[in-house]
Image (tube, helix red, strand yellow):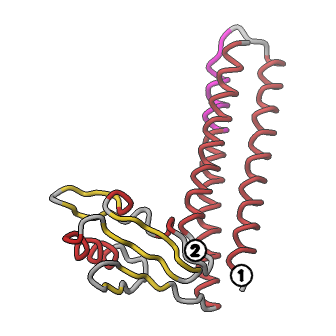
Amino acid sequence: MEELNMIMNMVKQEMDAAIKHLDHAFQKIRAGRASTSMVQDVVVEYYGAMSPINQVANVSVPDAMTISIQPWDRSAINAIEKAIINSNLGFAPSNNGDTIILNVPPLTEERRRDLAKQAKAETEQTKVTIRNARHDGMKELKKLDGVSEDIIKDTEAKIQELTDKFVKLADDHLKAKEVDIFKI
């Protein structure tokens, strides 16, 4: 029985991780409002080392359409600007010598559809990960010796229920993100 619980816990942890990854991916898909998470993955070359932007500058959102990046060391401002341009985020940084300002343009209908497609692709990838976790769990069940077929069948049914629950959760996250993307 302990082995069955370990398998169930392993499957649940993998599925939880897939949903957390989906949430993280959705944070990067902007829905018309400025957010510090839009630039969190930008990496800046700072004194020969690659550093996340939030370790070399203060990143803030003064209003709904602007991201302000104020480096702690003024000499890093050009490196930060270069990193933003090279990150292909679609922002044109404006550098005033002290601060870099990123203006977040309003989304067009076409761009909103592209973002919705991107969100759907992330969701599909999450569902694949969830199904792979189910497959791994089922494979582990088959390896068990000395466990009755009835118990294995019951555990397989529980794993399938868990899979269905997490797939529905991923779909619910997608619906919420689509509503957010298409909200004007």
Q: Residue at x 39, y 60 (%)?
A: 54
Q: Position of residue 96 (x, y in %)?
A: 30, 86
Q: Which residue is mark 1?
A: 182
Residue drawn at x 21%, y 61% is: 46
Rendered location of residue 12, percent (x, y): 68, 35
Q: Position of residue 64 (x, y in %)?
A: 59, 80
Q: Dots 1 and 2: beta carbons under 8 Å?
A: no
Q: Amino acid at mark 1?
A: Phe
Q: Is 21 within the magenta?
A: no
- The answer to whether residue 81 is left or right of residue 163 is left
Q: Quadrant of the N terminus?
A: top right
Looking at the picture, does residue 128 appear above or below residue 177?
above
| In this picture, residue 67 sits left or right of residue 73 | right
Name the one closer to the observer, 86 or 12: 86
Q: Is residue 86 above or below residue 165?
A: below
Q: Residues within 10 Å of mark 1 (few under 14, many from 20)?
A: some
* Residue 141 highlighted magenta (yes or no): yes
SS at mark 2?
loop
- Which span is picked out in magenta? 134-145
Going by the numbered disc 2, the residue's amino acid type is Arg
The dot on residue 159 is: none
- In depth, the one of 9 and 64 nearer the eye is 64
x, y percent for residue 104: 51, 84
At x 35%, y 63%, the residue is: 53
**In-image side of 73 versus 116 (left or right):** left
Image quadrant where one finds the C terminus = bottom right
Q: Which mark is residue 30?
A: 2
Which numbered disc, 1 or 2, marks the residue that appears first in the sequence? 2
Q: How many marks?
A: 2
